[in-house]
Image (spheres, grey):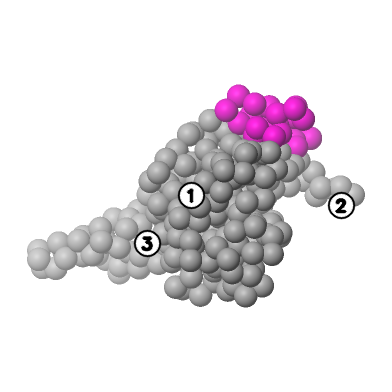
């Protein structure tokens, strides 16, 4: 379990208070999506997961390890992997294989174990065919998958994704999301920042942040059923939910807390049959 207890964080010298008393627990194997307006503290929060940032007040623990204790950092960073919004910020190798090997090499693992982990990570990220490619020749989507493979080579228990489909075309975005879903099914805990409400609707749990605090926390159905509260902080609802709200306002007796297209279609078909 990852636990935040009354966490405050301020960026100096600007004096920007990015987190204001955040308390949050993320369970093993859980799929949590973070949403909220720009500047609400989402990225600051996930950078506390593996001690890239440390609380000014409060505590963060990862499987019982306190991030404030420097001797815990190496272990915490094998438990929690981080995939940044811009993969160029974490890719350092010349070739794909070289980059994916970087983490295990820093763990001082035997060469045979490093080769095994690299092959395993490339396979799980479905980019084994790219192993000898030069990083400079990769597309944005391919670089995102290399970043994921580099994290997987560390065999983490949790992975935090900061807008993993940002700036990608639809095909590349779908490929990244398929890999994330596969990792979730394998039992890796997923913490996923997104501005895409259709992606948020697929999570087990949605945490809404606003101005450095936890504004709402619940299942997608619970969260997107609170349309008025979300609109107060300029959060768009999933498109299917928006359609159902318009149908409700027009007089049709539909539920408006639905986030699944198939469920919405079934409800509308039921109304047509009754008509």
> Badge 1 is on which residue?
120
What label does residue 145 carry, if any? none
The residue range painted magenta reads 54-76
Q: On the rendered structure, is 105 left or right of 244? A: right
Q: On the rendered structure, is 200 left or right of 258? A: right
110 in the magenta segment: no
x and y, in percent, of residue 170 in the image: 46, 73
Q: On the rendered structure, is 231 left or right of 135? A: left
Viewer can see residue 264:
yes
> Badge 3 is on which residue?
241
Which element type, helix, strand or loop, lies under badge 1? helix
Which element type, helix, strand or loop, lies under badge 3? helix
Residue located 67% across and 50% down the image: 102
Between the C-alphas of marks 3 and 1, the distance is: 40 Å
Q: Earlier in the sequence, mark 3 or mark 2?
A: 2
Q: Nearer the viewer, mark 3 or mark 2?
A: 2
Residue 162 position by quadrant? bottom right
């Amino acid at each position: 379990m990852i636990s935040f207890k009354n966490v405050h964080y301020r960026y100096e010298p600007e004096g920007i208070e990015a987190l204001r008393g955040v308390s949050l627990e993320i369970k093993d194997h859980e799929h949590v999506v973070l949403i909220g307006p720009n500047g609400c503290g989402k990225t600051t929060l996930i950078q506390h997961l593996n001690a890239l940032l440390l609380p000014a007040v409060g505590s963060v623990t990862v499987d019982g390890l306190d991030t404030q204790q420097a001797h815990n950092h190496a272990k915490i960073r094998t438990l929690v992997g981080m995939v940044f919004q811009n993969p160029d910020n974490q890719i350092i190798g010349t070739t794909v294989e070289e980059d994916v090997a970087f983490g295990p090499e820093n763990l001082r693992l035997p060469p045979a174990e490093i080769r095994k982990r690299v092959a395993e990570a490339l396979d799980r990220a479905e980019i084994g065919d790219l192993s000898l490619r030069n990083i400079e020749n990769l597309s944005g989507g391919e670089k995102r998958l290399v970043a994921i493979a580099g994290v997987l080579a560390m065999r983490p228990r949790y992975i935090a994704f900061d807008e993993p489909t940002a700036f990608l075309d639809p095909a590349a975005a779908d490929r990244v999301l398929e890999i994330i879903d596969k990792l979730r099914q394998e039992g890796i805990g997923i913490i996923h920042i997104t501005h895409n409400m259709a992606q948020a609707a697929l999570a087990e749990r949605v945490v809404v942040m606003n101005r450095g605090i936890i504004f709402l926390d619940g299942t997608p159905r619970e969260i997107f059923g609170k349309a008025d509260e979300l609109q107060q902080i300029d959060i768009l609802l999933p498109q299917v939910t928006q359609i159902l709200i318009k149908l409700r306002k027009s007089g049709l007796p539909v539920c408006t807390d639905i986030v699944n297209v198939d469920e919405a279609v079934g409800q509308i078909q039921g109304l047509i049959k009754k008509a």
